Image: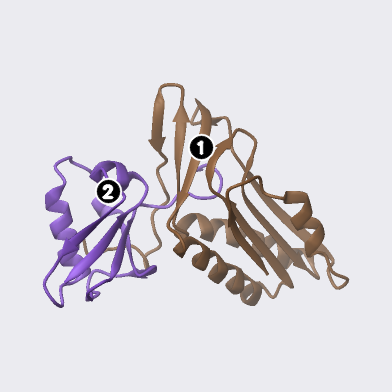
Amino acid sequence: MQIEVIYCGVLKDLFGCQREEVYLAEDDTVAILLTELRERLTVETKIWNSLAVAVNDEYAGMRKILKDGDEVALLPPVSGGLCAG
Amino acid sequence: MRVEIVYDALPVAEVMEQIKAGADGAVCVFDGIVRNNTRGRQTLCLDYEAKLPMALTQMEGLAREALQRFAVRDVALLHRLGRLQIGETSVLIVVASAHRGAAFEACRWLIDTLKKQVPIWKKECFVDGAVWADGEPFPAEIALNEV
């Protein structure tokens, strides 16, 4: 099945693109997708420990089962509003 | 309730005036502006980006929750995206209520919660390059703890 992955914030720079299509097996989960994406990235980064994921624009957990055509956004810790601190 | 994501200057005075109604005794405003430094390092400008339409949906959810949780009469929650200069407003929160206590509390809760869970990011431009700002850790119910 085909999943559209969206990279937000710093992840866009790390992966060098804003979105890409990823092919997974039926019933694969968010966890499996992340493992696959993690292997593609050659740079070392701590970002994986602080991510959130949104499936079709709703926050989702690692065990969420993906469906063909889902959009999965990888979200680094957010920093909207005013400056940090 | 007024919730918007915009790319131009936020209409601070207009939102403040428009929200007022006869039953209100207090209007509490939080005007988040771009500071000229980050931990002492001079900032030139900030670039804000969001995951859309998710950010707007999340902001609408927060505004509705604030109305219920604090029993305030009305809420405006606006965020600007794109390149912002020093002193410009990036986020505007206006709460109208019969009494000041609830207005202050709702305003504080809205900015604190927005900063933790609305998918918006900023890149800080310095003289010698640009970096994505460290965000706040996600709340436990959103974070992928099983990693």
Measured as percent of width and height from the top left, residue B62 is found at: 56, 68
Give the colour chain A carries in the figure.
purple
- Decide if residue B61 is on the left or right side of residue A10: right
Say what amino acid the circle numbered 2 marks: Ile
Which residue corresponds to the image point at 27% horizontal and 48% vertical from the top-left?
Answer: A47
Q: Pointer 1 indicates a residue of which chain?
A: B
How far apart are the two marked residues, 1 and 2, measured between alpha carbons? 21 Å
- Decide if residue B96 is on the left or right side of residue A29: right
Category of crowding for the residue at label 1, using alpha-carbon neighbours closer than 10 angstroms: few (below 14), some (14–19), many (at least 20): many
User: Which of the numbered marks, if any, corresponds to residue A47?
Assistant: 2
- Decide if residue B95 is on the left or right side of residue B43: right
Which residue corresponds to the image point at 39% horizontal and 67% vertical from the top-left?
Answer: A57
User: Which of the numbered marks, if any, corresponds to residue A53?
Assistant: none
Which residue corresponds to the image point at 66% horizontal and 57% vertical from the top-left?
Answer: B93
Give the colour chain B carries in the figure.
brown
Task: Using the rendered view, name the quadrant where residue B85 is placed.
Answer: top right
Q: Pointer 2 indicates a residue of which chain?
A: A
Say what amino acid the circle numbered 1 marks: Leu
Q: Which residue is mark 1?
A: B46
Front position in the image: B146 or A26: A26
- Decide if residue A47 is on the left or right side of residue B41: left
